[in-house]
Amino acid sequence: MEETIVEIPNGVNVALNKDSFTVSGSNGKVTYKFKDVSLSLDSGRVKISGKEKVQVNTTQALLKSAIKGVTEGYTMKLQMVYAHFPFTLEQKGSVIYIKNFLGEKKPREAKIVGDTKIKVEKEFIILSGPDKHAVGQTAANLKAATRIKDKDPRVFQDGIYDPL
C-alpha cells in the first residue's frame, strides 16, 4: 500500500467526491477524475493512498497541477504567421473562428476547451486558464485548425505556431 500527502495552501479549497476531486481558488476551479486510489482530507492536507505507486504519484501530480492552476494559472503564447493574407480570430461562445486564412471565404473553427481565456495582441495569441490540460488542448486545436494540406510546406508557411 502506497501513501503520499499533499499540503493545501491557504485560499485553496479541495472537495472530494467518490471518484473525483475539485480544487477551487482565486483563478477558478479544476476537476479531475481518478480511480483505484482513495483520497482523504484532514486539516489542510490530502492523503492519497492506493495499491500501486504509479497511480498514487499520478493522482498527486494532478492535484499539485490543479493547485498551481487555481493559484497562479497557466499561460501559453502562440504566434500567428502569414505571408499574404492576414487572418483574424473571432470568438463566439466556446468556438474561435479563424477568418481569411489563406484567403479562404469560409472561416475555420477551433474549439475552446474549459475555462480557457483567449487574448490577441498583434500577431500573438495568449491563452490562459486554471486547467493545464484545457489550455494545452485549446492551443493544439488552434494549431490543428490552421494546418495546411496538399500544399508545399516550404512555400505555404501560414498558420499558428509556438513563438521562437
Image (cartoon, rainbow, N blue to C red):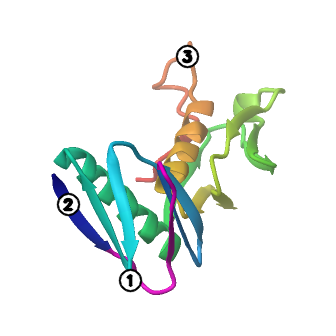
Image disc number at residue 151: 3
Q: Based on the displayed image, in which of its 4 quarters is residue 87 positioned?
A: top right
Q: Which residue is mark 1?
A: 43
Secondary structure mostly taken by the magenta-highlighted segment of the chain: loop
State which region is magenta.
7-19
Q: Earlier in the sequence, mark 1 or mark 3?
A: 1
Residue at x 49% of width, y 51% of height: 18
Q: Can the viewer see residue 146 in this picture?
A: no
- Single out the residue that lies furthest toward the top: 150
Q: Based on the displayed image, in which of its 4 quarters is residue 35 positioned?
A: top left
Circle 2 packing at 10 Å, graded few (<14), some (14-19), many (20+), is some
Q: Nearer the viewer, residue 78 or 133?
A: 133
Please indicate whether residue 109 sits to the left or right of residue 63 in the image.
right
Image disc number at residue 3: 2
Q: Based on the displayed image, in which of its 4 quarters is residue 63 positioned?
A: bottom left
Count of residue discs: 3
The kind of residue tagged 3 is: Lys
